[in-house]
Amino acid sequence: MKKILAFTLLLLLIPLSSPVWATYDGSHLREPNITMTPTSGPPGTKITITVSNFPDISNEPYPYPDFYIYIPFADALGSGNVPSQCGKEMCFPIYTYEDAQNKNFADKTITFTLFSMSNPKPIYLNGLLHSVCDIIVNSKVQQSYADICNTKSQPTGNYEIEFAWATKTKPEEPYFIKTLEFKVTEGTPPPEPTGLRLDQTLMDLYKQGVISEQTFENELKGLGYSEIEIRQAKAVLGKLPHQENAEPTTEKPIEEPQKNQTIPQEPAKPQKNQTIPQEPAKPEPVPVSQPSSPQNGCLIATAAFGSEMAPQVQLLRELRDNTLLKTTSGSAFMAVFNSVYYSFSPTVAEWERQNPIFKEIVKATITPLISTLSILNYINIDSEAEMITYGVGIILLNTGMYFVAPAVLIVKLNSFAKNKRSIKS
């Protein structure tokens, strides 16, 4: 009997101990190639980090690893800047297990500008504030710093930008493999290239397909550009209809340069101390493509969990980019979903920011939904049929949780109340 009790006690104590395999060991994974330029500079300096030659991690066992970057600059400005899963220090994965499964080993370019009181003011794009300090990975905004970009300057000193392998289940326990040091010096950043940075930001976002043509035109009009100046800007970017090999749209007749003709060198008329960047007379050929629709985020979830980099919001983003948009049926579903979702989500997100109680209610409401959607990130969907099957299953599961189960509970409670009243009578 004593042996049985001792064995039972041992079984109870084992789960309470900390196993040696609790922290992820990424020593067997190859280190990608990582470069950073520059390695020092004053506040307002633009930093570019390139990561390439990722290893294939598609055969790694569970828990699946992701490759994280840790950017410490916001931490030096004090607490309460941007919440993240790494505490005050900003971190996020730039290469994931899902990327490897989809054979997506493309290089990642991370750009951002150090905080400086000499930075330009933020601008609104699709109702969201963006600044030159935003962390952008391959044209996608990972974190916005519009509120502090030009209101504080980066303190001088040495900063360590770290890279690590970490699992999805425990990103707070990384296996660091490389550290790059950046020295923030005193002084002013180098002169800005020709053209105001706000204009250049808009042009970069439009050329990369982050914002739509209509948004690009509206924002330039808001900066004081005329129709002719907007057309000149599009010509410099190679975005006129004939430059994209598309059918010309019906517009107000304006003398339009033909293929292989020299683009006019004359810059746009300055508006409010703004200038159009001076580009070479003959723009480089661009791929035949149309600007994609605006990359709006998960507004309700972002407002509920406090940050675009919250694990729950990252999960939704990965589900959309790595699973749904990889299939025709998933893309069709997202098109319909977005048309409905973005008709009310900005209002709901604003209510969340204004009312903490409502925010907590929304968080509690969408948490089960996010948990069920996470299933799609851990299965291989190789065909349209599988996408439809799993999608319908997830929809039915959520219908049961949010509608059927509450309805059954209400009926049961109502029946119980009636029985109780009949007994009393």
Image: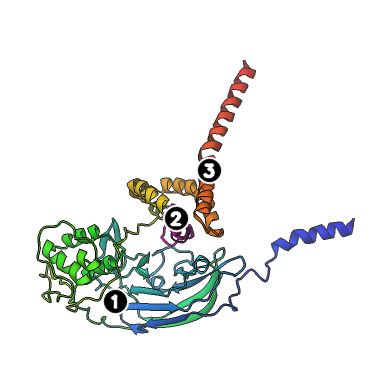
- Lateral position of residue 388 relative to residue 112, left or right: right
Residue extending furthest top? 425
Q: Vertically, is 148 above or below 421?
A: below
Find the distance from the CA under tag 3 to the CA under tag 2.
Answer: 25 Å
Residue corresponding to mark 3: 396
Q: If the image is split into quadrants, where does the C terminus sit? A: top right
Question: The N terminus lies in which quarter of the figure?
Answer: bottom right
Discs 3/1, front: 3
Report whether residue 226 is seen. no
Kindly identify the amino acid type of the residue bearing the numbered disc 1: Gly
321 magenta-colored: yes
Q: Which residue is mark 1?
A: 44
Quarter of the rendering containing residue 185: bottom left
Instruction: Choose the circle earlier in sequence order: 3 or 2.
Output: 2
Magenta-drawn segment:
305-329
Q: Amino acid at mark 3?
A: Leu
